[in-house]
Amino acid sequence: MKELSVQEIQFVSGGFSLFGAMSGFNSFLANASQSFGTFALNSGAAFADFVADSAAAFGDFLKGDSNWNGFAAKSANSWDKFTDTAGKNWSEFKDNASAGWNSFLDGAKA
């Protein structure tokens, strides 16, 4: 049985590059992980801000420093900031993961 060279393996594989695929997949994993980490960190911080702001606004309501409408407005504003941050960061993660996946597919072609 003949031992195949790398070129022969690529020829028989139907245009699949094992080295390109491994490199592309590792790059995809690294970029997607970093992007997801950024999403989780920023969204988590924005959610913590929402909780803190809402709790402070509710405390003001309980003390009589604001009315219910003031509490609701501050909470809604804080929620909007959270959803904007989470949405923006999710979109960036999705775009980075998609680009990384496409690079992996391109790298897998011989």
Image (cartoon, helix red, strand yellow):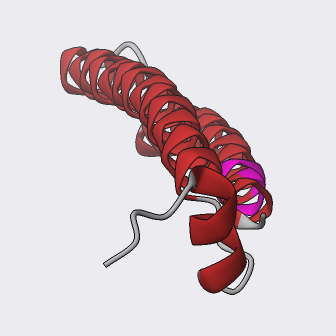
Q: Residue 16 colored magenta?
A: no
Q: Indicate left or right for 56 with 50 as reference.
A: left
User: Is residue 70 something one can see in this rendering?
Assistant: no
x and y percentages locating residue 15 in the rendered image: 74, 77
Q: Quadrant of residue 47?
A: top left
Left or right relative to 27: residue 42: left
Q: Is residue 1 or residue 43 the one in the foreground?
A: 1
In percent of width and height, residue 33 lies at: 42, 34
* Vertical relation: 59 (above or below) 82: above
Asked whether 43 or 6 is in front, the reply is: 6
Q: Where is residue 3? Give x, y as percent.
A: 39, 63
In the picture as drawn, the residue positioned furthest to the front comes out as 1
Above or below for 16 versus 44: below
Tell me the magenta residue range: 99-103
Q: Quadrant of the N terminus?
A: bottom left
- Could you tell whether 58 is left or right of 41 in the image? left
The secondary structure that dominates the magenta segment is helix
Which residue is drawn at the image coordinates 47% and 38% (left, top)? 26
- Can you say whether 67 is above or below 72 in the image? above
